[in-house]
Amino acid sequence: MDVTDSAGRAAYISFIVSLCYCTDYELGYDPTVVWNADKKYWVIKCPDSTAAKDGKVRVVEYYARKQIIEAERIFGRHTRGFAASLNRNMVDEPDTFIKDAWPYESSDSQHTSQNELDILKYIEKKLGGKSVDRLGIVRAENSGIVRFREAGNLVNDDTSAMLGSVFADFKVALSQTPTVPTTNNRALTEDNPAKSILLRVHQRMILQPLGRPLHTLKSPYELIIVLADIMVAHSVILKTCGYLHRNISPNNIMVVDDGERVRGLLIDFDHAIKTDKSRLAIAERTGTLPFMSICNLQNSKVQRSELDDWESLLYVVCWLGVHGVNRDEQVAYQQEIDAMCKDDEYYKPPLAKWEAGTFDDVAITKKNDLEDDESFNDCVLQYFQEGAAYDELKAMARSLRLALFENPELSLLYSGVSVIRDIPDKPASRKGAKVL
């Protein structure tokens, strides 16, 4: 609006007046999360997925003292996590994780996001509750779309409700755009049937058990145990339930204590996909940039398989081997890097190119870093933290690279060797490899 003319000034005044009459929701407040200033805890209303489906809003209240995962940015999934309890008197001894996120939804039926609650319930039913607990697979309780009353109407908290008429304008603009990169690393193009409105829906889920982050581990020895646990769970889920996780990263691996030892806990099945032919044929990028497989980064026509997730595990091992396993090591490493960057403005930290640039840039970097044992050592392994425990982590990384990229049991067309040696993509499956 142009305030130099009368029409612009009138529009500006109208805007200010409208802003004064906005509801809390229109101003960006979430009415389902309220801070109790007297008790100093959050009261979080979660959808009651066990209640009757009669159109009424039924919620279960949980109590949380602190937020253990904070959203890193305004856009994207905006995932937050709370350590909570159903009993307000036990708020300082939480046993539940509340996942609050804005997953992407598509109006295209072939690309509709998976319902994580349904996936976890299916896994629990298929494996049995005791097996789920033994394997270290997160269990889901109450979950669903965040809904509330606004001006007497029942509202689904999503981007269309927030943006109102602007959302329709955005939909038109998107339909006229040849390429739209989305925040979940999926490229929508003219020849991609997933091209649709970018609708994000506010979902909240109750998960148990309550794990702790990887950076709370004491040593690489504990990390190896945790990674072994979650990949056993990954393999069982794939073989028995037919779901491929597709987002192995440090944020999706938690730690639980089991007596004198630690155990791994695999979480976040938002990107999990049923491994039938119709779903595997869909080529799409998913995951967290530094941990995405080369085929995933290249949006290869090669069907996604367990090899992509095992390759992501390799990158997790390398990332933590260089940056450090626990928080103290990570802070010390970052301070060292900051000092080196201050002394030399052109200095590039190890693995920096795994999280910067385009998808193709990162794919090329990884190809070069993993091309052979010498390159892998020069570009990655030599930068691992020092100590006998990290030497064990190096050995694990070497074994994973050999199994994925130089596996004699696999045809070149079906193994990671294809992406290293620039063999043309083939619309074939790469599953069935013996990784470890």
Image (tube, rainbow, N blue to C red):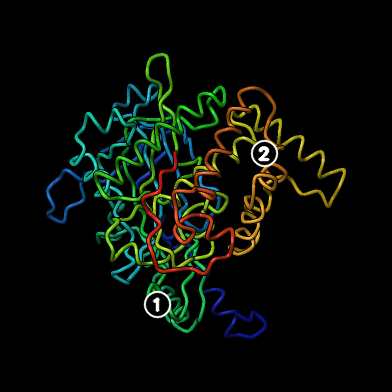
Percent coordinates x, y for residue 57 in the rendering? 21, 50
The quarter in which the N terminus is drawn is: bottom right
Q: Residue at x 38, y 38 (%)?
A: 266
For marks 1 and 2, the one nearer the N-term is 1
**Nearer to the camera, 5 or 270:** 270
Q: Tag 2's secondary structure?
A: helix
In this rendering, would 405 be left or right of 193? right
Residue 326, image quadrant: top right
Task: Give the amino acid at mark 1.
Answer: Ala
**Nearer to the camera, 246 or 393:** 393
User: Pointer 1 and pointer 2: residues touching (CB < 8 Å)?
Assistant: no
Percent coordinates x, y for residue 398 in the rendering? 58, 39
Residue at the spot of label 1: 168
Task: Give the amino acid at mark 2.
Answer: Leu
Query: Number of marks in the image?
Result: 2
**Label placed on residue 381:** 2
The quarter in which the C terminus is drawn is: top left
